[in-house]
Amino acid sequence: QVQLVESGGGLVQPGGSLRLSCAPSGYIFSINTMGWYRQAPGKERELVARITKSAVTNYADSVKGRFTISRDNAKNTVYLQMNSLRPNDTAVYYCNADLRITWFGPSSEYWGQGTQVTVSS
């Protein structure tokens, strides 16, 4: 069973930086769009950023200029560089990817288990 495995969350002071990473745990045939979502306590899950296979990106307005999404297609890995972090960036961050496991199968949406990011002094 393929899973998306995230790493890089933690506690950081306001103004600090963190880098999240995410990759599938097993073999996959191809990956299309990859992205990051977040969910703060009492709020709905929201898009943070996403990137297509050809590296076209889009961002939530609240993170533009502070966060950068990138991917390494050779490693099937997506990254989220988060700078100038604010307390209201505190949330569980989830990796999302559109994966095709086999050449003959359909693409399906996968989610990671989530990684906690806490911004606090």
Image (cartoon, rainbow, N blue to C red):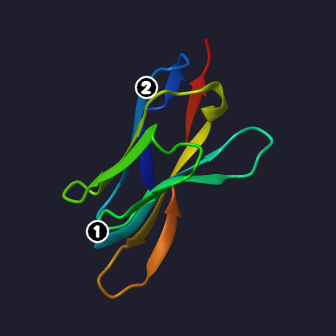
- 13 and 97: which one is in front? 13
List the residue tagged with mark 1: 54
Against 17, is 114 above or below? below
The quarter of the picture where the C terminus appears is top right
Q: Secondary structure at mark 2?
A: loop
Q: Position of residue 89 (x, y in %)?
A: 61, 34
> Badge 1, how many Cα within 10 Å: few under 14, some, many 20+?
few
Taking the spot 62% from the left edge, 17% from the top edge, the residue there is 120
Q: How many marks?
A: 2
Which one is earlier in the sequence, the residue at label 2 or at label 1? 2
Q: Position of residue 101 (x, y in %)?
A: 36, 73
Mark drawn on residue 68:
none
The quarter of the picture where the N terminus appears is bottom left
Taking the spot 32% from the left edge, 79% from the top edge, the residue there is 102
Q: Position of residue 30 (x, y in %)?
A: 30, 72
Q: Secondary structure at mark 1?
A: loop
- 107 and 93: which one is in front? 93
Visible residue check, residue 2: no
List the residue tagged with mark 2: 17
Taking the spot 51% from the left edge, 19% from the top edge, the residue there is 12
Q: Callout 1, which amino acid?
A: Ser
Taking the spot 61% from the left edge, 46% from the top edge, the residue there is 38
- 41 and 112: which one is in front? 41
Q: Position of residue 64 (x, y in %)?
A: 49, 45
